[in-house]
Image: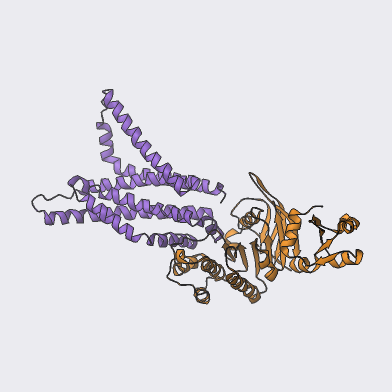
Chain colours: A orange, B purple
Amino acid sequence: MKNSIEIKNISKSYIGFQLKNVNFNVPEGSIVGLVGENGAGKTTTIKAILNIINTTGEIKIFGKDNKKYEKEIKKDIGVVLDDSFLSEYLTAKSINTIMKEFYDNWNEKKYFNYLKQFDLPTNKTVKDFSSGMKMKLKIAVAISHSPRLLILDEPTSGLDPIVRNEILDIFRKFIAEDEKRAILMSTHITTDLEHISDYIVFIEKGNIIFNLSTEELLENYGIVKCSKEDFKKVENIDYIKYKKEKYQYEILVQNKYEFRKKYNIGTIDKPSIEDIMLFYVKGEK
Amino acid sequence: MKEIKGLLKKDLLNLASYKSTLIIVIICICIVGSMSQSAINYIPIMMTTMIGMIALSTFSYDEIAKSDKYILSLPTNKKEIVIEKYILVIFSILIGAILGFIITPIIINAINYFNKENSINIDYNLLLTTTIGGIFGISLVSGIQIPSIYKWGAEKGRIQMFILVFGLIAIIGGIGYLLVKANININFNMFNNFLDKFGLTLLIVTSCIILYISYKIAHKIYLEKEN
């Protein structure tokens, strides 16, 4: 399987923050979720991919160096950033005039169809749009030149569940249309990723904590709830982290089926991505 | 080149929302200029300065929308972004200068039409001098302000420019005051002769050099800046 993005050992230092030897891939045909707390390094990683900041290490997009072939690569990428877009004094119609200069593949008809589909007015300035409308406009702009790769930084933050669901549907359709397409989506709303992502990359304080398939995470991982006595029977290598609650111990295990075979203790719950993240951040070993 | 065109379109479409303000400013300049015979000749300076300043306001649009990061995610690069800003400012200065040069005789003719007794002669030499003076002035301001904006942002850059302009006025005024106080008479004839012969050419060449050096500095600052 080819990779749309290959990241090898990228590092970046700021005062009080360090991105340390980040490695992960975004395979073609997949949606990869980049999750982590605010300030964990998600946006820094995205900025590095887009060559907005200088980093050490190697980043390849469509097999090409992201610095050397920057403009060529960016013609095939669609980007949605939560906190950055064109001026709000522009209209959706004027954005079309601007964007067709940047992308050779810009499809005006497709863009106006998206505006219609998303119920977005063409002659109203963006400042009069609601948050959901603004995000839909950013997405329409990002996908109207049929990019091979979508890079999304917090595309659903601050939106109500209905709009969030509509937006996730757009991403599903985008991937389904062409198997060579890929999406990298950073978010701290992990429930969104449970529905659409193929892989989850969890970043914490600039370090990649895990990079696993969503299926493996949700199907194999388990939270064992047991007594203190039962917990003492569990070997250190058989669990990832544990949390000491008021009346019981909670243990995060990598493979609940194997754990069950070895130890017949407590109950095992299916964790959410958020639960797993919390164990990694707050749990003990 | 297409990308620079896209960036120019972005800024021009942003400025389109400014068009009513721009028309009011032009009308105000015309009214102020027509109030006295001497003020009329300063219309090209005012026009060039105002239109040049409006082009600089596109930096504020970008800053308010935090567009920098998004624009850098488009198929362009920092060099093209800086070049585009200079193209926009240079064209705005030229449009302001041409507009000032054309409007001034129209206003003078209009005044002469209503006030035939005290008609004003159109001095094209003076008009050219004030126009080129305006070009030089706003080139100097833009040349200082654009790198400052890339370094400190549009808001801080503006404050810095005001400090600079007032600082320059204070220094020049201070030197003049000291010369008068100290009873020092400088023979300006040589300077005047030189300026009469080469002044306008010198101003144009200096304006070009200022903007070129300014571009080089702005580009270097922006390349090193982490967005």
Counting from the top left corner in percent of width and height, residue B178 is at 30, 26
Q: Residue furthest front?
A: A247
- In the picture, the quarter occupied by the N terminus of chain A is bottom right
- Horizontal and vertical percent for residue B102? 25, 56
- For the question of whether residue B68 can be seen, the reply is yes
Looking at the image, which residue is at 40% across and 47% down?
Answer: B142
Residue at horizontal 71%, vertical 59%?
A: A202
Residue positioned most to the left: B117
Horizontal side of A4 relative to B184 (left or right) equals right
Report the front residue among B192 and A94. A94
What residue is shown at x 90% (from left), y 67% (from top)?
Answer: A261
Q: Position of residue A280 (x, y in %)?
A: 76, 56
Can residue B125 be seen in the rendering of this structure? no
* x and y, in percent, of residue A161 in the image: 60, 69
A87 relative to A36 in the view: left or right: left
Q: Judge left or right: residue A49 versus residue B112.
A: right
Residue at left offset 20%, top offset 51%:
B34
Q: Quadrant of residue A204?
A: bottom right
Which quadrant of the figure has residue A273?
bottom right
Residue at the limit of the structure toward the top, as seen here: B182
